[in-house]
Image (cartoon, rainbow, N blue to C red):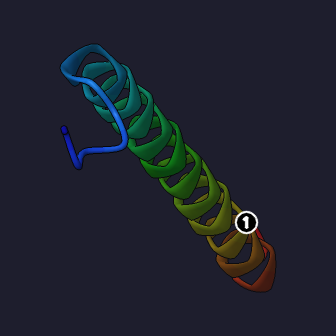
Amino acid sequence: MNNTPFNPADMARRRKRSVIMALVLAALMVLFFAATIVRIGSNFAAMAGG
């Protein structure tokens, strides 16, 4: 009797979904970081009078 709950095809599908979710999360982190940098930069520009 096989004790693994998932067959290799299921595990491959899960791994692919995990990689995609990790890439989406990383993209969101970069997007939020860039938006934060832009907002901080605009605040510095406003304080400098430009």
Is residue 49 depicted above or below 18 in this figure?
A: below
Q: Is residue 13 left or right of residue 40?
A: left
Task: State the count of labels.
Answer: 1
Residue on which disc 1 sits:
39
| Residue for point 39% across, 32% down | 14
Q: Nearer the viewer, residue 31 or 37?
A: 31
Q: Is residue 35 left or right of residue 43?
A: left
Disc 1 residue crowd, few under 14, some 14–19, many 20+, Cα 10 Å = few
Determine the residue positioned at 52% across, 57% down. 29
**Mark 1, secondary structure of its residue:** helix
What percent of the width, then of the height, locates residue 47? 77, 85
Q: Report whether 14 appears left or right of 38.
A: left
Residue type highlighted by circle 1: Arg
Q: Say which of 6 and 48 sits in front.
A: 6
Residue 33 picture location, percent across and down: 54, 63
Tell me the quadrant of the picture where the C terminus can be found.
bottom right
Residue at position x 36%, y 22% in the image: 10
In the picture, residue 9 is in which quadrant? top left
Above or below, comparing residue 45 to residue 22 in the picture: below
**Residue at the image position 43 percent from the left and 49 percent from the top:** 26
Q: In the orientation shown, which residue stands out farthest toward the front? A: 1
Vertical arrangement, residue 43 with respect to residue 32, above or below? below
- Identify the image quadrant of residue 16: top left
Q: Position of residue 39 (x, y in %)?
A: 73, 66
Instruction: Say whether residue 38 is left or right of residue 14.
Output: right
Residue at the outermost top position: 9
Q: Quadrant of the N terminus?
A: top left
